[in-house]
Structure formats: structure tokens, C-alpha cells
Image (tube, coloured by chain):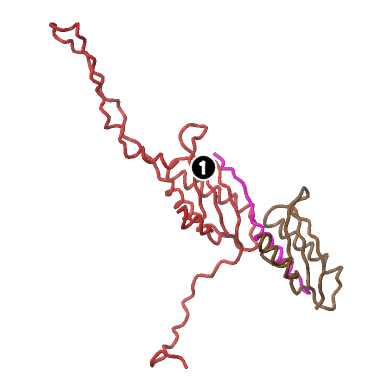
Chain colours: A brown, B red
Amino acid sequence: MATGGELTFSRRVLSEIAFRSAMEVPGVRGTSGDLMSGLIGRLKRGSAHRGINVSEDSRGLVFRIDLVIAQGGSIVDLGTEVQAKVGSQIKLMTGRDAVVNVKVTAIE
Amino acid sequence: MPDDDKGATENEAAEPQKKPKPRKKAAKGKKSKKAPEAGPPADDKGKLTFDPSIVTSIAIAEAQKIDGIIELTGSFMDDWVLRRGKGVHVEEEASEQGGEAYSLDLKLSVEYGVDCVKLAEKVRERIGKEIKRVTGRDTRKIDIHVTGIGHKEAPAEPHEDEPVAEGTGIDF
């Protein structure tokens, strides 16, 4: 008898995956968020990290990542790479499709 | 259901098999006729029941053997207040084939990078098989909720004996 069941993920886990895979891209310094959104995110338990927001709609999981990047690179290249990396890692680990919106908020 | 295990204490086999036959008053005066009494049913050896905590232990033990799982994660509420098993919630229900089947809820944390879909299949297969082996019952479903992520701690390496500082033990 095959055992069925559901597989679900905490938002915290999803944002952690997004954070780690974004950090793997060279040139990414981190994610950011102003204090207020960070606090709200904590309170809503939406995210383990500042600057990463996870929601879900008909397209699948939707990530919004506020990115801090290092000086010298191309924002477009880096952003695209982060989108690809986060999307593929989410797909790999959770089997779900992800839309990744990246907003570069600072260059250090 | 937890009430079920009370059934274990009442031993059905011990119930008196011979019901006192209603004696007919009309038979007074005659010798009461001896009806051949039905013997006790052939195989009524008693009932075997499991406490749901058995299933919890099986699930925990088996999950710890699976690569990719760091641990089962129960909330404080589950662990200490409700006294449920850590990260495991078991329900018993009647299965379609008759008898009981289990359905489980697992909360667990996984290693970063593992394919959770495959992991979930493996968890269902192995825990289902183990429960079947031990209790003989089916597992209808196992819901898996990934609540944490991280790296498994390497088994504690025996580090070199640190020279124990002699003296008072007070660091200056």
C-alpha cells in the first residue's frame, strides 16, 4: 500500500534557501531591508532574513529579494544570475516553481 | 484514538462464555434437560493493541537513519505542553481494508541542498515499511512539513586532550 501525504515548507525554510543560494553568487554582499520591514517580517514570521519576502500565487512561489552587491560588477548580470540561482535551487530542493524578483538596494 | 488502548486492559477472553440459560419454569418436576453447551470459541486469545507512542518512536528512530534529515523538530508546545512526540503526531484511523491504519504528521529539518521531494518519498517508504514490519498495520499517509534547514553537525570528533591547567582553576 503506497503511503500518501503532503509535503509543505515553512516560509522560514524557503527564505533560508533563497538567502543561501543568493549568497553563493560572487559579488553578492548580502540582503538588506530597512529596519521597519525587517521587524514586520519578523513579526509576521514571513522570513528568516531581512530583505527576503516569500509569498505564493498562481505562478508558484514568489520571492522578493532586496540585494546588496559589491562594487564593480554589472547589476544586470548579477541580478539575472541571482534569479537563476535562486530559482533553480528552489526547484531542486522543493520541486516548486519560483518567480524571483530582485531589487538592488545598495552597492558597497 | 488514545481511548483504544483501554481495550487492552479489558480482556475479552475472560468474559464468561456460558450465559446462564433461562430455566423454564415449566420444566419443574422434570429433570432439567441438558442442552449441549457451546464450547468457548476456538481462537479468542485476546487483543493486541499499540499505544500511538510506539509509532512515534518508530518514526523517530527511522527518520534518524535517513540521510538528509537533520532532526525532527517539535515546537515547545508540542514537546512539553501537549506531550506529543517530538515532531511527530500520530493518528489512528480505520483503514479501507478493515482494521486500523496510521496517519502521521512529521515536522523535520533537512540539510541544505537535498531534494526534499525525493527525501519525502524515501521517508514515506521507509517509515511506512518499518511501521508495517513492527505493528503489522498500514500507514495511510505521512504529511511532511519542512520547518528547518541547516547542516548536520559532524559527529563529535574526539579532540586532543587539552592540557588541564593546574592550579586553582581561576583564570586571570
Residue at image x 25%, y 27%?
B16
Chain letter of the residue beneath label 1 in the structure image: B
Locate residue B28 relative to residue B105 in the image: left or right: left
Say above or below: B26 vs B18: above
Name the residue located 78 percent from the left edge and 67 percent from the top edge.
A66
Residue B28 in sight in this render: yes
Locate residue B34, reporting x and y percent. Answer: 18, 13
- How many marks can you see? 1
On whether residue B51 falls in the magenta region, the answer is no
Report whether residue A16 is seen.
no
The quadrant holding residue B140 is: top right
Q: Is residue A20 above or below residue B88?
A: below
Q: Quadrant of the N terminus of chain B?
A: top left
Q: Is residue A93 above or below residue A39?
A: above
Looking at the rendering, the stretch of residues picked out in magenta corresponds to A1-27
Q: Residue at x 49, y 43 (%)?
A: B91
Q: Nearer the viewer, residue B130 or A99?
A: A99
Check the image and report above or below for A53 versus B13. Answer: below
**Can you give x and y, in whole percent of width and height, for residue B55 in the image?**
45, 48
Answer left or right for A76 relative to B16: right
Hey, what amino acid is under mark 1? Thr
Which residue was labeled with disc 1?
A: B139
**Residue at the image position 23 percent from the left and 20 percent from the top:** B20
Q: Residue A2, image x and y in percent?
A: 57, 41
Does dot 1 land on a helix, a strand or a loop?
strand
Crowd rating for badge 1 (residues with CA inside 10 Å; few <14, some 14–19, many 20+): many
* Residue A3 located within the stretch drawn in magenta: yes
Location of residue B124 in the rendering, given as x and y in whole percent from the top left corner: 56, 48
